[in-house]
Image: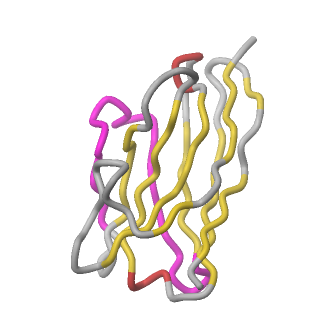
Amino acid sequence: QVQLAESGGALVQPGGSLRLSCTIFGSNLAYYAITWFRQAPGKERRGVLCSRSGDGSTDYVDPSVKGRFTIARDNGKNQVYLELNNLTPEDTGVYLCAASSAGRGCATHPTEPLYWGRGTQVTVSS
């Protein structure tokens, strides 16, 4: 059974940084593209960044985070990382990682992934 687990969420001040981790269990990360989604309070879940399987290249599902957020993967550790920099209160929300098959490629809509983690809370506040 494939499971994903996020960690690293926290309360951080505006301008601060966080590193979120997504670990996949029960399978090999190399088989999947991993998309980070976020869900702000009262809003729909939206894609942020994706790490493609194979070359691990990045797909900016939400182009507005370019220059502040980056994604990286370590297939040997079965982990994908989301680096969040220069955070603002608008970045507050639950951050979830989701896996889609290598053949399907990056998920850009919440209906597309095969597997989901439960999320980790990021709160940006002074």
Q: How is the image coloured?
A: secondary structure
Which image quadrant is residue 93 in?
Answer: top right
**Residue 18 horizontal side relative to residue 2, left or right:** right
**Residue 19 horizontal side relative to residue 69, left or right:** right
Q: Residue at x 63, y 81 (%)?
A: 25
Asked whether residue 75 is drawn in magenta, I would say: yes
Picture mark count: 0
Residue 44 position within the rendered picture, expressed as x and y whole percent measured from the top left? 43, 31
The range drawn in magenta is 57-78
Q: Judge whether 125 appears above or below 87 on screen.
A: above
**Residue 2 horizontal side relative to residue 31, left or right:** right
Nearer-the-camera pick, 58 or 1: 1
Q: Residue at x 53, y 27 (%)?
A: 40
Q: Judge whether 60 appears above or below 42 on screen.
A: below
Nearer-the-camera pick, 73 or 101: 101
Q: Judge whether 116 appears above or below 12 on screen.
A: below
Q: Look at the image and tell me in which quarter the N terminus lies.
A: bottom right
Which image quadrant is residue 91 in?
Answer: top right
Nearer-the-camera pick, 27 or 16: 27
Asked whether residue 72 is drawn in magenta, I would say: yes
Q: Residue at x 52, y 57 (%)?
A: 97
Residue 48 position within the rendered picture, expressed as x and y whole percent measured from the top left? 39, 43
Most extreme residue toward the top is 126
Q: Residue at x 67, y 34 (%)?
A: 122
Q: Look at the image and tell me in which quarter the C terminus lies.
A: top right
Residue 28 position within the rendered picture, expressed as x and y whole percent measured from the top left? 50, 88
